[in-house]
Structures are given as C-alpha cells and as structure tokens.
Amino acid sequence: MATHQLELAGGVATVTLDRPDALNALTRDSRRELAAELRSLGKRPDVRAVVLTGAGRAFCAGQDLREEAALADVETTIIDTYIPVIEAIRELPAPVIAAINGAAAGAGLSFALACDWRVMADDAVLMMAFSNIGLVPDSGGSWLLPRIVGYERAFELAASGRRVQADEASSLGLVQQVVPRAEVVSTAQTLAASLAARPPLAVAWTKRLMREALSATLGETMRSEAAAQADAVATADHAEGVRAFVEKRAPRFEGR
Ligand code: T3D
C-alpha cells in the first residue's frame, strides 16, 4: 500500500503522507518512498512548486515507534532513509512548502524545518520529541532549528521536548503563516501556485544560493551569485521579464 499520495495540478505537486491511522509516523518504507518521490519531482521541469502535508489529523509523528525494525542498526537506517528525505527537499530545485495540518514531531518536524516555507494549522503542535524518549535530534534537527530560532531557543525546545502551539511557533519564526486547519493545504497550494508562476530557473537558483549561503562566507556567496547571475541573464525568462516590463504586461515564464 502506498505510504503517500501525489497530486499534480498547474505546476504544483502536492505530496500527502498517507498513514493517518499512525499519525503518518515514518517507517523505513515510507521514508524510502518519500525520498524517491521528491527526487523524481526534482527532475521534472513541469513541477514548479511542491506542497508537503499529511493525511488525517497529523502532519507526521516522526519515527513509527511501533515498527519492529526501528531499533536495528539505527545509524545506517538514518543515513540510508532519513537523510535522503532532507537532502531531497533541500536539493529539489522547486520550492517546497510544508502544510503542517496537525502534529509535527521528531523527524516529522525535521522534515518540515527543511522546507522553504511553513504554513501551520492554528490547532497543530510542533514538538522536538526526541529527548522525550531519550534520543537526540536527527534528520538535521540540530542544524536546522538553531538557524531558524537561534541556539538558546533551539536548545530549550530540543531538551524540553515540549509542545509548541501555533501562536508561539509563529512568534519564534518556526512557521511563516498560521491559518485555520481547513485552510492549511489550500493556503500552501495558493502560495505554491504563485511561486509556480515565477521564473523557475531564477527561483531554483535563488533557493540554491540562499541554502548554500547558510554555510558559506560573504565572499564565496557573492562569487556564487555572480556565476548564477551570468546564467540567469542568458535565460529566455530574463528576456521575457524585461520585454513584459517595457510593454507593461504580465510576463509568461517558460523555464528556459
Ligand atoms: O529509531 C530510529 O529510527 C531513530 C530515529 C528517530 C526519529 C524520530 O522521529 S524519534 C521521535 C519519534 N516520535 C515521537 O516520539 C512522537 C510520539 N508522539 C507524540 O508525542 C504524540 O503522539 C503527538 C505529539 C505526535 C500527537 O499527540 P496527540 O495527543 O495528538 O496524539 P496521541 O494520543 O499521543 O497519539 C495518537 C495515537 O497515535 C496513539 O495511538 P493509540 O493510543 O490511539 O493506539 C499513539 O500511540 C500513536 N502515535 C503517536 N505517535 C506515534 C504513534 N504511533 C507510532 N509512532 C509514533 N511516532
């Protein structure tokens, strides 16, 4: 049985984790299938934005604590099945928007934090659940969280394992929008559609530049920008953008 669903509409791919009876908790298979799906979407020029969400009342409860194989060879499991999901989100050229429809806990929260934008349901909770069961953050949680909220808040959230409600998540900058639960996916899809109408190469290169800048120097970043700008200037979308500006009309970007 499929562990997620995929819907494509107007350049927007919506990936829905689909194990609602287990709060979309992650199994080896579900992680492998999700990483493969995201990598495959990354190769499709017709996919210009991705929404990641969960079926039922949760976004993702992290590792499925009832999966029998869970504790076997954890280091290899993390390297082989968790990290590829995070890397697929980060390396996907199109923006990835998390539509946090319900609880996001443990690695499920790490998946959301790896996304480029987060929309959260007003009754959802975020939880660095790892320490509640004697574990440490994984799937990039130790790297992502301090970069979003600063070291002290990240440490407190991870060490306490407490629930973070939507208003606090918003004030900490953990999520960018809070909306009623019934609107969380449509809000993310509307934003995704607006991003899908933007010049896809410029958006993809902007994502890459800013991601890389998080662990690069100013000098390195400015040189990467210069190289990317040389590529951007040569695109048909740049020519179309300038033409549309001069002709006072909306541009039509084709991704080349
Ligand atoms: O081993 C390795 O691979 C290492 C890597 C680990 C990565 C990780 O992600 S570790 C973190 C694992 N996740 C958690 O510890 C989260 C556990 N869940 C919760 O804290 C809460 O359930 C939630 C905050 C997610 C939601 O709370 P709430 O109050 O809305 O729901 P609930 O009543 O706690 O849970 C509802 C049901 O879902 C319940 O089952 P039941 O009693 O109705 O039969 C609960 O056991 C089940 N459930 C929730 N989370 C998980 C789960 N079942 C399996 N695995 C889960 N992670």
Image (tube, grey):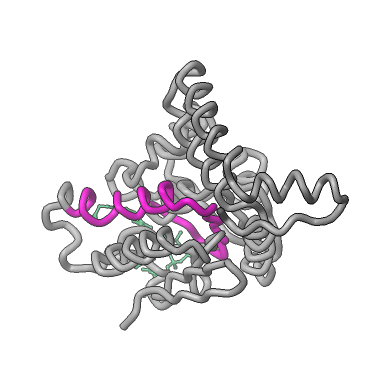
Instruction: Tally the numbered discs.
Output: 0
For the point 66% across and 53% down, the residue is 198
Left or right: where does residue 146 sit relative to residue 203?
left
- For the record, the magenta segment spans 77-106
Give the percent coordinates (x, y) of residue 234: 57, 41
Please say if 182 is above or below 176: below
The structure residue drawn at horizontal position 12% and vertical position 53%, both measured from the top left corner, is 73
Q: Nearer the viewer, residue 160 or 80?
A: 80
Residue lying furthest left = 73
Name the quadrant where ligand 1 sits. Answer: bottom left
Report the quarter where the N terminus lies.
bottom left
Q: Residue at horizontal 46%, vertical 37%? A: 145
The quarter holding residue 122 reads bottom right
**Which one is nearer the viewer's eye here, 247 or 11?**
247
**Where residue 3 sits in the image (x, y, percent)?**
35, 75
Relative to residue 34, is residue 224 depicted above or below?
Answer: above
Residue at screen point 45% across, 33% down: 212
Q: Is residue 140 left or right of residue 103?
A: left
Residue 104 forms part of the magenta stretch: yes
Q: Position of residue 229 (x, y in %)?
A: 57, 33
Left/right of residue 50 with respect to residue 134 in the rendered view: right
Rendered view: 58 above or below 2: above
Q: Is residue 66 above or below residue 148?
A: below
Q: Residue furthest right?
A: 248
Magenta stretch encompasses residue 20: no
Q: Residue furthest bottom?
A: 1
Horizontal and vertical percent for residue 60? 43, 63
